[in-house]
Image (cartoon, coloured by chain):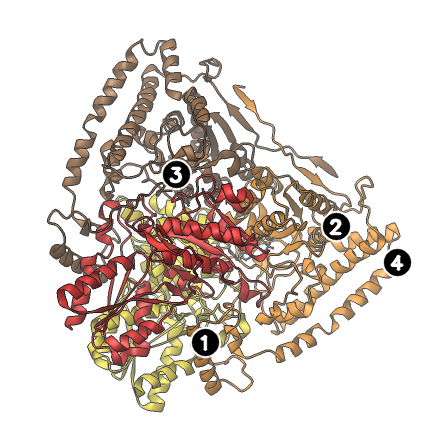
Chain colours: A red, B yellow, C orange, D brown
Amino acid sequence: MAEMTMVEALNHALHHEMDQDASVVVLGEDVGEDGGVFRVTDGLIDEFGEQRVVDTPLAEAAIVGASLGMALNGLRPVCEIQFSGFSYYAMHQIENHVARFRWRSRGRFHAPMVIRMPYGAGVRALEHHSESKEVFFTHIPGLKLVAPSGPRAARALLLSAIRDPDPVIFFEPKLLYRKFREDVEEEEETWPLGEARVVREGDDLTVVAWGAMLPRTREAADVLAEEEGAEAEVIDLVSLAPLDHEPVAESVRRTGRAVVVHEAHRSFGPGSEIVARIMEDSFYHLEAPIHRVTAPDVTVPFFARENAYLPTKERIVDAFRSVLET
Amino acid sequence: MAEMTMVEALNHALHHEMDQDASVVVLGEDVGEDGGVFRVTDGLIDEFGEQRVVDTPLAEAAIVGASLGMALNGLRPVCEIQFSGFSYYAMHQIENHVARFRWRSRGRFHAPMVIRMPYGAGVRALEHHSESKEVFFTHIPGLKLVAPSGPRAARALLLSAIRDPDPVIFFEPKLLYRKFREDVEEEEETWPLGEARVVREGDDLTVVAWGAMLPRTREAADVLAEEEGAEAEVIDLVSLAPLDHEPVAESVRRTGRAVVVHEAHRSFGPGSEIVARIMEDSFYHLEAPIHRVTAPDVTVPFFARENAYLPTKERIVDAFRSVLET
Amino acid sequence: MPRESMELKPTFETLSILDEEGHLDRDLEPDLDDEELEELYRCMVRARRFDELLLEWQRSGRIGTFAPVTGQEASQVGAISATGPGDWFVPSFREIAAFLWRGGDPVDMTVFNAGWNEGVRIADDAHDLPIAVPVASQVPHATGLAYAAKLRETGNVVMTFFGDGATSEGDFHEAMNFAGTFELPVVFVCQNNHWAISVPREEQTASETLAQKALAYGMPGIQVDGNDVLAVRVAADEAVTRARSGDGPTMLECVTYRLLLHTTADDPSRYRDEEEVERWESRDPIPRFRDYLVEKGVMDEGRDEVIAEEVEASLEDVWSDAEERIEGLGGPEVMFDHVYAEMPPELTRQRERFSGIEAETAEPDEQPEAEDDEQPEAEDDDG
Amino acid sequence: MPRESMELKPTFETLSILDEEGHLDRDLEPDLDDEELEELYRCMVRARRFDELLLEWQRSGRIGTFAPVTGQEASQVGAISATGPGDWFVPSFREIAAFLWRGGDPVDMTVFNAGWNEGVRIADDAHDLPIAVPVASQVPHATGLAYAAKLRETGNVVMTFFGDGATSEGDFHEAMNFAGTFELPVVFVCQNNHWAISVPREEQTASETLAQKALAYGMPGIQVDGNDVLAVRVAADEAVTRARSGDGPTMLECVTYRLLLHTTADDPSRYRDEEEVERWESRDPIPRFRDYLVEKGVMDEGRDEVIAEEVEASLEDVWSDAEERIEGLGGPEVMFDHVYAEMPPELTRQRERFSGIEAETAEPDEQPEAEDDEQPEAEDDDG
Ligand SMILES: Cc1ncc(C[n+]2csc(CCOP(=O)(O)OP(=O)(O)O)c2C)c(N)n1
Ligand SMILES: Cc1ncc(C[n+]2csc(CCOP(=O)(O)OP(=O)(O)O)c2C)c(N)n1
Ligand SMILES: [Mg+2]
Ligand SMILES: [Mg+2]
């Protein structure tokens, strides 16, 4: 058992998997000698060589498009987009091809590949380094998207993502990269993709969050319990595509109230789908309208204001209170 | 007064606006000599010359990126992406820059430009020619997105879009390009962006649709009236960004029931936002869960099955019935 | 060296062996056996004929839009015939002739063109990718396939096809640069057919040739007479050999011409002169090659007629076979297949609901509902 | 012409005037007056000094990540000084020296680097675009600006800056191709500083030079000693003149070196040798140019000290001025400004709700809440 940060846990997963499976390759900008700008790929090049740990030219569409070609020819590429804000350079490769190759070829080909990308605000970075646009990917049939909320989840999910036969967008909450350590079992642990997890039980209120928003949402739930004596059930969605709605529905039917927290923009954000699903199958159990605590519909401000942009613990608690009051 | 198809109405708007305003330029693939693959830009090059009607090299990111540069330097570019399925090639230019220039420069610059793109299925086209991914754009702060549902709307909205000081994604429902004619007043008519329109009044049910889905939604409402004696209020959303929610909310508060129809994939589609907004401000008026009639979460099938993929009139009527029955 | 003109390495070349007048450069003539020469010819003829049939079927509404190959047979067959079955074929959307050379089934292509996903049917051991519609988007895939081939030491090379217009896309550039940087076993075959829909080659780029673009990636480029199947084959053989021996990628520019329309939705009279087309008709790769084969004694006079009949026979049943296959295909719920290895619960729910409604409202034969969705009279509605 | 090596037009060149040993090629020496020569020098020195200050402020936590210019002053100042105020300046993210030459205010840049949107402050009549962080994404903007300048006959040209890494991006390719095709008045200045974060120039592309990439667009390319401000200036003058007289675009490759780190979040010791850095320190553009100016009699011995002091004085109050400006800035609800010309109703609602909650929970001084969001100990967290 070792205490690890999320960066270490991800790095551990990559070392492990490259060691186990010779078909795994890592590619991207600065993933080799530099070990990745966040050090997630640290040491890989020394252990596995520059054929399998590839510093590519600076070209996101080619990184993704070439990864697809690799995946079609016997490899399991894990490519890195340095920041999710630059993934749009490769959007056409992702939408037009990565997501569709199994479907287009009617199963003759498939694309076992992972596209890793740090997402989210809060690390005092430059413009375009703080985006959270999950829906760009979750709205595309054929893709999976997961976002770990801690080191243990990060390792377990990355292992599953690499082994998955379908393309996985791996959203890494950079705010949590080094924020806390967690015990990560020596033994290999994998989490199935497509499964949400109840991380705090409660009967008064259902709360859905993931990735970087999860820790503060849990804290908000604790504050609520302390200050109001109300118990929120907190669900770490983990997987946004496929969306694991069942545990959410089950919980909402019990609590009758729900809050969704995300750092994506509010409008057309992932929260709206969660609301719509609850509407569809659990409407009659709702005792109050569902609240969304989100970033506003504005571009992430430069970093001096980014913490105000993000949903704060206080805002989350406020939303809990409002939902409980109505 | 003239009867026009949507293609003619759009063409009319472009002729009119290029004639009125020397700063308007049209650019894209095959928009010049060929008049556009759908003939929307027919005749422009003869009238305004190849400096203002520009056949570009085959490069979507440059079309959009150069349009932005033009917009920053005194022009009003109207660029065409030949099919919305190829707009992802330019996604980084749209997300990283087009949507942000006013914001980034704190108002020193703005980007008065229109990105036209035919969207949607139903014309027996090849793969990638039938997409409907509104949310890619509506989720980006700083963009507007409108989708006309008929020739008159098409002309009125395109004029407004060209004159708008901010970038507008102009979603043209290619299924309706030549499907019906409408009277289009000789006199100039503009519709404000950001305004939905009630196109059929009713007190039993609120229905939201736009673009290619609007005509069949209206027909479905007529069927409902005939067969069930129930009157659906049909709202043509027209503008998805900014989303004009007020008329929807007003209507739902009256009817207590709602259906959203769209041809985008169901999950994380535009319908979910409409549901979430109703949830937030009109929950207590709802008598039944809101239904979404959408395309499924699968890639648009090749054309032999595309009509089954799209929401059909029958499915829409079915949804009306279900919502009214509960 | 205060101010100097630089010399560029690698240099690039032009190649022509059998010119449009039928003059042969014997020093450059490749050493192919008679059987193979006839196979090249047969494939070109078959592609041309299949094109005609598809056009006919399209005009009578039996199939949808497609991109004809007529005029480009030498470029495609000359290039692809340099590959072996283990090599990868990465097409764009006009590679009918190359597809046939690779053993593609015209029935599949017809089913595909009739709008059925089942028309994409690739054998488990075939190294052929499906058609890529988004221009230039397949070029990075070729690069990735080649990376894997090199890393896994499979000994296979990759050949990808694209048009003159495709060279303007960022994907072309990024993929070529990757291939150059990693010295990958890829052959980039650019079919310069002079038009990208309505945009002529000269308006696509100010570069004098397309082949010289290879120099930006430290890669040899060669401009070949694309209507001279011998020249294309020689250039392709060299490129394949270079790739296979680990010496990296090559770009071929095959100078050819799209004799017909861009796709069946296109009307070239809007943008190009009949005269230009006629000029290129006189450079037709098929008669040029036939005359060479006759001259060389590979074919007797009249042999071309026999081949034409054999080709005809091989295509005779394509439509009826395609029809038969189509009749046996599943209903619209087939669209839910192959989205993921395992269908997620929500998709299963969607399919169940879909099938329920289909059962209620659709015709028993499960054809898509006609409704009021007649086609708009699209003109070029295919891009 | 059965098989021939092709000659490429336009050819491309290399240029060096004042080499690293201080040898001057008098035939090529530009005819600049003393005042301007001193201005060039002063700007280079000022950029270097401002870099130091920013680095200091960054290290003490006063500002965030930024990309230092040290080592590249000659490339930037040599090039940008060929433009006039009506011309457009289209930077990427490292153009501190060019920004200063254009009259940019170091206080603005400091406010920007401290994380405040208000640091982007462009005068109404300035033709300067803000920093573009996404690599190569600004290059198409330059092309579009130039298209408009040409169409509107403004007589202005556009100069855009980017790095060696940027040449691998599709946007670079597409924009260069547009500019070549439409013969636009743009100067493309590629600062080959040998590194794209940790990736060396040789691994970025197999192309021997970056300048030769221009040939793929029918555009002249010239490789210049980027640490020789005279050479850069001469090449830029020619390119600007060419653009202004309607003869189309040019690409300059300025061969230079990033003497410091990629950004303040970077640790170059992970990927490059100190020796390489030392080799380039000996080619430092500033002392080389100073010696030339002294030799030439433009500056007396000791004049450089005076200039250094004047530069120091001009930067002395930057931090305190920036602090003062920051104190006067609005609260977090400023983030709702300038999204659209007119704020849509939903955004107004969001702002109201936001401000309501802000008022309740935020500190009176409206600083972003500290909460538990301390920074992760990011290393290169800036890309
Ligand atoms: C990214 C993208 N943009 C636009 C289109 C529409 N389109 C299809 S083919 C074509 C022209 C292609 O020209 P070229 O590369 O020369 O190939 P050719 O058609 O001549 O074989 C265009 C613009 C597309 N399929 N993909
Ligand atoms: C599209 C994109 N991908 C990745 C990054 C992260 N990044 C910032 S600078 C840089 C390297 C740029 O290298 P170069 O073009 O040589 O410019 P230099 O930093 O040397 O000035 C990278 C990868 C980015 N900003 N944008
Ligand atoms: Mg072509
Ligand atoms: Mg660099």
Residue mark closest to the camera, 1 vs 2: 1
Mark positioned earlier in the residue sequence (4 or 2): 2
Residues packed near mark 1 inside 10 Å, few (<14), some (14 to 19) or many (20 plus): few
Horizontally, residue C216 falls left or right of residue B2, namely: right
Type of residue at label 2? Val
Q: Dividing the image into four equal quarters, which quarter contains ligand 1?
A: bottom right
Q: Are marks 3 and 4 on the same chain?
A: no
CA distance separating discs 4 and 1: 62 Å
Q: Which mark is residue C229?
A: 2
CA distance separating discs 4 and 2: 20 Å
Q: Chain of mark 1?
A: C
Type of residue at label 3? Glu
From the top left corner, tell me how far across and down residue D148 is, in percent: 39, 43
Type of residue at label 4? Glu
Q: Tag 2's secondary structure? A: helix
Q: Tag 1's secondary structure? A: helix
CA distance separating discs 3 and 4: 64 Å
Mark positioned earlier in the residue sequence (4 or 1): 4
The residue that label 3 is drawn on is D153
